[in-house]
Every structure is written in C-alpha cells, then in structure tokens.
Amino acid sequence: MKIVIKVGGSLFNEDLHLLYEDIAHLVKEGKHQVVLVHGGGPQIDAILKGQGKQPKFLYSQAGVRSRHTDEETRDAAVMALGGYVNKNITARLIKHGVNAFGFTGVDGAVMVADRKDKIVSVDPATSKRIVVRNDFSGRIDPERVKGDLILSLLGLGITPVIGALAIDDAGNVLNTDGDRAAASICKAISGDAFISVTDVPGVLKDMESKEVIPRIPAGNLDAVMEGVTGGMKKKIIAVKEAVSFGIPRVVITSGLVEHGVTKALDGTMGTAITQQ
C-alpha cells in the first residue's frame, strides 16, 4: 500500500516520537511504502519574527486564511521547509530505522506550480476586498508532479520527506499549501491512502464535546467547513480535492497518539472522507 502522510508545522512543537514509531512500523512491515509531506507555518513565523518582520495573512470570502508570501516570507519558507523542519524530520525517522531522504518540491522540479500573481483578499474586520500582487505562493498542477521520481525512491526502499515548496516555469520558488501538495503527490503516485495528521483526533462535531465525526461523505464537506475554524478549513478543502482525485482512503487524524496512522488506515480512528 502506498501511503502519503501530511504533517502540519503546528505539530513540530509537540513530541512526535509516536508518529515516527508508527511510520517506522508501517515501513518495516514491508507491506507499505510511505511518503511524508510537511509544512512549517510556525517555523516560518519564528524566522520572520527573528528578522523583525510580522507575518501577514490573507482571507478568502469563505474565511479561509492563507499566508501572504512576499519575497522575504518566501525566503523564510525556504529556510523552514527546505532546512530546519525537513532535516529534523528526516533525522528523526532515520533514528527510528527508516531510510528517509529529505527534499522539497523544488528539487528536481518534483512539484511545478502556477504562481498566484494576483490574489483577492477580504479584510475580516471590514469585509473590504483587497487585491494583493507580487505574491510568491502557488497552486500545484497535479499533472506536473513527478510521481515517477517519487516511485523510484520508494522502489529503492527510501521514504521521501518532502517540504511543500514548488517551482514555476519562470524558476521562482513558491510556497504552497501542504495538504493540497500532499493530495497532488498522492494522485501522482496512484496512492492508496492520504492521511492528514494534526493535533486533534479528527473533525469534531463541536469544541465542547470533542466528539469526532467518524465519516463524512464528500458532498457534505462544504456544510462541515462552515462549522470548523482555523487550519481545519484548509484541510477540508484538501481532503475534498483528494477524494475528487479518486484516492481510495482519505482520513484526518491525530499524529499524537499511539499508532494513529495505523488506526486511521484500519478505520478505528479519525475522520474518513468518503465518496458517498
């Protein structure tokens, strides 16, 4: 089974040894091939603040927040996703006996994206629309992800660790959404499962009860997205896209519990997104 696991940057402030142990168990079983895709939002923020620059964010009409990636922010993203976060994950997987190899979507043009030259943002305080130009973020073209290269690494017994940066046709390094990057990679390698791990056990019915919704039909995701906040909105968009790609198993689950990914695969943990 080919499994693509997306890990958000917010998790890297936590002890992830359970996640690394789970990935090592899956790989060492010999039945599974794993690709790990990661973001690094908090780490980008830390680099920017260390340089005396405040992170900036944009908001869609639906209230989805994304990063305003000006040139300085893009450079911070390269440091975080291509350096600190990527190499730390790679080193920890190696420590757990996994033959991990870290890189970003820029290397070998593994992920090619279309740059968002003009972005329309909505001011959440006034609802005023703002046009933002000269942004260095991009939307990955799933048809231009080099799945063959990733499959070659898997065939050699290597576990790729891919930072969510991409390149465009003009040679610009672009910041991308990690969950959507992972979904595109899963499509490119004809993956069997896309697992998005986060710091909660799945999509919650409400914040008070903390009860997890075990299954959501893809057709209900728009309604569900209205009731969630923060980064979960972006995850909903990504898993909806993953289901549209025909990926057989799509799950949002916790990366902070024992065998979280394994349990997501066997249907005993997390929120599964289904066609029907």
Image: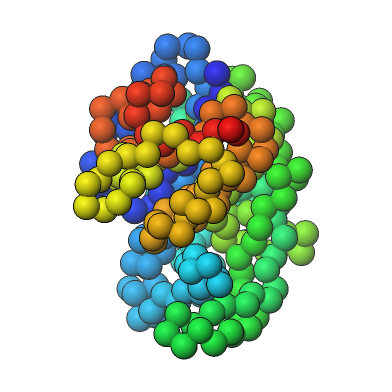
Quarter of the view holding residue 188: top right
Quick check: 130 above or below 229?
below
**Viewport quadrant of the C terminus:** top right
From the viewer's perspective, tell me whether residue 208 is left or right of residue 222: left
Quick check: 265 above or below 226?
above
Quarter of the view holding residue 91: top left
- Look at the image and tell me whether residue 265 can be seen: yes
Say which residue appears at 51% left-offset and 60% top-offset: 78
- Look at the image and tell me whether residue 150 can be seen: no
Quick check: 223 above or below 45?
above
Say which residue appears at 34% left-offset and 53% top-offset: 10
Please tell me which residue lies in front, 61 or 103. Answer: 61
Q: Give residue 154's position: percent from left, percent from top.
A: 58, 24
Please tell me which residue lies in front, 63 or 180. Answer: 63
Q: Give residue 119's position: percent from left, percent from top.
A: 64, 75
From the viewer's perspective, tell me whether residue 116 is left or right of residue 65: right
From the viewer's perspective, tell me whether residue 207 is left or right of residue 1: left
Q: Give residue 49's position: percent from left, percent from top.
A: 34, 74
Please tell me which residue lies in front, 217 or 41. Answer: 217
